[in-house]
Image (cartoon, helix red, strand yellow):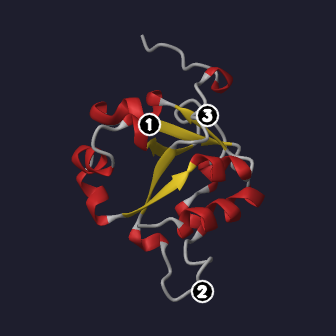
Amino acid sequence: MTEPRPDVATLTVVTEDALIFRFVQPGHIDATARVGSQLQTSALQTNEFTPNDHSYGASVYVESELKRGVDDLFAACEKWKEWRYARVPVDKVNAIGVTVVLSPQDCEFDSIRHAHASLIGVTKPRRNELLRLIESHLV
């Protein structure tokens, strides 16, 4: 039998001085749009806003929890080598009202499970701010 998922309120909050990685599919970027609106809303879908039985929120990875940074992520999932990613300071995420919590329960990759985190508090009004923030940190 599967253990019950911990309540989101009991998850460890990631410190403000941390950096997180958020992956973005190339198809979610409109290079013809003006800067600040190139990252499409499909890059942060509405179903990622509310914790449910399978997910606490939009997935990110905490850089300080990875031995080799983004290389650990690429090793865990080959498709990410084709995607873009943003390396975003947690304090900037917090400034728009979104909290980052460790959520290894949501990670499908054993080797990086310990670094998985979720974005809590994303709402439709905050999504656009968050998308601009992620876009401004795309690598």
Q: CA distance from mark 1 to mark 2?
A: 31 Å
Residue that protrudes farthest toward the right in the picture: 125
Considering only vertical position in the picture, is 21 above or below 133? above
Q: Is residue 57 left or right of residue 83?
A: right
Q: Earlier in the sequence, mark 1 or mark 2?
A: 2
The residue mark sitting in front, 3 or 1, is 1
The N terminus lies in which quarter of the figure?
top left
Farthest residue, direction front: 17
Q: Which residue is mark 1?
A: 116
Residue at the image point whose x is 41% and y is 65% from the top: 25
The residue located at (44%, 36%) in the rendering is 116
Residue at position x 25%, y 43% in the image: 76
Q: Position of residue 33 (x, y in %)?
A: 57, 86
Residue at the spot of label 3: 52
Q: Position of residue 130 (x, y in %)?
A: 64, 59
- Secondary structure at numbered mark 3: loop
- Circle 2: residue type: Arg
Q: Which mark is residue 34?
A: 2
**What amino acid type is highlighted by mark number 3?**
Asn
Q: Quadrant of the C terminus?
A: bottom left
Q: Residue at x 29, y 37 (%)?
A: 67
